[in-house]
Amino acid sequence: MKLSQSRRGFLLAVLAGACLLPIASNAANIIVGTGSDTSYFVLQSTNLGVRTYEVKYNYNSSVPQDGFFLLDQIRVADSSISFAINNFGSLLAPNYFVDSITFNSVTETGVSAPPFTPYWAQWVSGGAAGFPAASPKPSGTWSFGSGISAPYRVIAPGSWDALVFSNGSSAPSVSPIPETSSAALALLGSLVIFKRRRRS
């Protein structure tokens, strides 16, 4: 049976969309937490490899959520990993930094003497970050972080955080592609192919 031009165009559009959808769906490989919103956290080192967590939660704009919140969701859900975190602030105004991460009984700890490397370098994309006050960070590109707790880091749906055990000069090897942009790309690709085929 021969497909009509419009049906063939529709089939090609569906196939193109199916090929592009992995771009949107493979952004994270370990899902933790529950809720209608999503942020991502990448952990990267020799021991860990590259682990990307897709953290589900319910966003609340009146109560700032931060990178510490995301790490706590990971800790609760993944018994193979634990974190040692230092507070360079106070109990009422914490300024948390990750000192060490233990994965499968192997611990990687930041060096506390010159030249102070390697250490757990923080990277962010989307949301807000900065010292002394957080400011908006562009989505889709990595920026250097200034601590994992609010007010120095505030997450938002679609934001990315990362910790890389390194000298701090290299961003994570995972691209912080916003989920909605990838899905939109897949849909746009399908529509363009479908429209082009219908005109033929």
Image: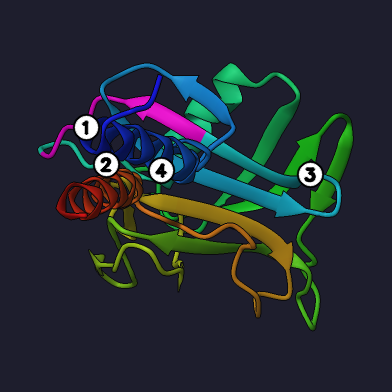
Instruction: Bin the neighbour count of mark 1 within 10 Å (Cα to Cα): few under 14, some 14-19, many 20 and up.
Output: some
Using the numbered discs, state the Cα–Cα distance from disc 3 to disc 1 in whole angstroms. Answer: 28 Å
* Image depth: mark 4 or mark 2 in front: 4
On the image, the x and y values in percent for residue 189 come to 31, 51
Q: Which residue is mark 2?
A: 157
Q: Amino acid at mark 4?
A: Ala
- Tell me residue 102's x, y (percent): 78, 37
Where on the picture, by quarter, is residue 136? bottom left
Question: In the image shown, does 64 or 139 lie closer to the viewer?
Answer: 139
Q: Which residues are magenta?
A: 54-61
Q: Residue at x 64, y 62 (%)?
A: 173
User: Tag 2, which secondary structure?
Assistant: loop
Q: Nearer the viewer, mark 2 or mark 1?
A: 2
Residue lying at 52% horizontally and 25% vertically, measured from the top left = 31
- Residue marked by disc 1: 59
Q: Earlier in the sequence, mark 2 or mark 3?
A: 3
Residue 32: x and y in percent read: 50, 22
Q: CA distance from mark 4 to mark 2?
A: 27 Å
In the drawing, does residue 139 fall left or right of residue 87?
A: left
Q: Nearer the viewer, residue 82 or 8?
A: 8
Asked if the residue at tag 1 contacts the one at tag 2, i.e. Cβ–Cβ closer than 8 Å, the answer is yes
Task: Report how far apart the C-alphas of labels 2 and 3 lie in the structure.
Answer: 25 Å
* Residue annotated with mark 4: 16
What residue is drawn where x is 85% and y is 29%? 104
Image position of 35 with respect to 97: above or below: above
The mark nearer the N terminus, 2 or 1, is 1
Separation of disc 3 and disc 4 at Cα?
Answer: 34 Å
Question: How much space separates mark 2 and mark 1, taking CA atoms?
Answer: 7 Å
User: Which residue type does callout 3 highlight?
Assistant: Leu
Q: CA distance from mark 4 to mark 1?
A: 33 Å
Q: Which residue is mark 3?
A: 48
Identify residue type, mark 2: Pro
